Amino acid sequence: MHLSVDAKHLETEEASAALDRAAAILRAGGLVALPTETVYGLGANAFDRDAVVRIFAAKSRPSWDPIIVHVASPAMLDGLVAQVPAAARRLMEHFWPGPLTLLLPRTAAVPDAVTAGRPLVGVRMPSHPVAIELIRRAGVPVAAPSANRFGHISPTTAAHVLHDLDGRIDAVLDAGPSPHGVESTVLDPATTPMTIYRPGAVTMEQIRAVAGSVEIFRSSEPLRETPAEALPSPGVGIRHYAPRARLVLVDAPIFDALNLESLLTELSARLQAAATSEPDERAGVMLPAGAAAPQGIPKERIFPWGRWNVPEELAQRLYGGLRALDAAGCTVILCPLPPPHGIGEAICDRLKKAGAREQRPGTRD
């Protein structure tokens, strides 16, 4: 079922009817793909174990990967989390509603399927007006990982959702493209220093300014395709956000159009030279504004990514670009890595996980 809502006009009869229908599906144990400010999520009643298990089945998501619960207000944490540390309350005051997920002690009412059996549950209050209103009308916290097949590129439009999950879910609530384009920051506020398990739209610098010392999680052991135990947080698996095409990442910490053009052209030439042994190789490029396209790659396999000095633009267009190049039939995608600062840290995190394969000199593949 495809339900459309104009986020700027939720007062209309059409919007109210679509929201009520989606809320009824959630209360009845169904699955609804919903827009958030980050990406589209696949939602179910977080207290309904059977509904949550349906999320995992629809996505082909393994049980060791926990999922995030979305609330419409801090009051919805009652019955969901056992306690809220002082640092978490400060962060909620500054960043909720918004793209910050906090790992908090769960209550017994939260099914093990949500947390992969772990004692902490990831919770956030989205800022998208349609998501907030849907959760409010449903009257229950909504468990919602990204609305895509497990490991594939996250969806930032309803069309992306339907491409992956049409026929596997009950409804998609379409409110247009997601504004941020990358998933929420996931933070454990109870560790010393606090731990970011997944960088996102709320940056390390912003968190530090509000609540003190924070660091990004680094696993002491190499991540595996199939971990030996449940992951400590959503978003730390080795291979996520991946296109069908092989992803070749180009280090470009200081953007120079001529230098980037040279790097991309060199890699493109290398790929074309290898085409004698791999005649079906089709290269595509995530191309920042200001850089010339490498020779030999046709226009339809070049995605205009955005301005290099506006990382928010790169983040918003990242997943759409990877999906567009997949749709264009690319078998390999060349993509520069932006500087890992601010939201650039989140972009690099997603690209490295999308291209988590063998390493090559000068590139990350």
Image (cartoon, rainbow, N blue to C red):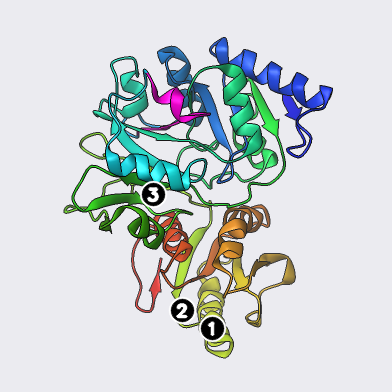
Mark number, residue 239: 3
The residue type indicated by label 2 comes to: Ala
Rendered location of residue 262, percent (x, y): 54, 87
The residue at which mark 1 appears reads as 260
Question: What residue span does the magenta drawing correspond to?
Answer: 66-78
Give the tally of numbered discs: 3
Q: CB under 8 Å between callouts 1 and 2?
A: yes
In terms of image quadrants, where is residue 231? top left
Rendered location of residue 118, percent (x, y): 25, 29
The secondary structure type at the circle numbered 1 is helix
The residue closer to the viewer here, 21 or 304, is 21
Residue 168 shows in this picture:
no
Give neighbour class at mark 1: few <14, some 14-19, many 20+ (Cα, 10 Å).
Answer: many
Residue found at x 79% / y 35%? 9
Q: CB under 8 Å between callouts 1 and 3?
A: no
The residue closer to the viewer here, 349 or 248, is 349
The residue closer to the viewer here, 211 or 105, is 211
Mark number, residue 202: none
The residue at which mark 2 appears reads as 252
Give neighbour class at mark 2: few <14, some 14-19, many 20+ (Cα, 10 Å).
Answer: some
The residue type indicated by label 1 comes to: Leu
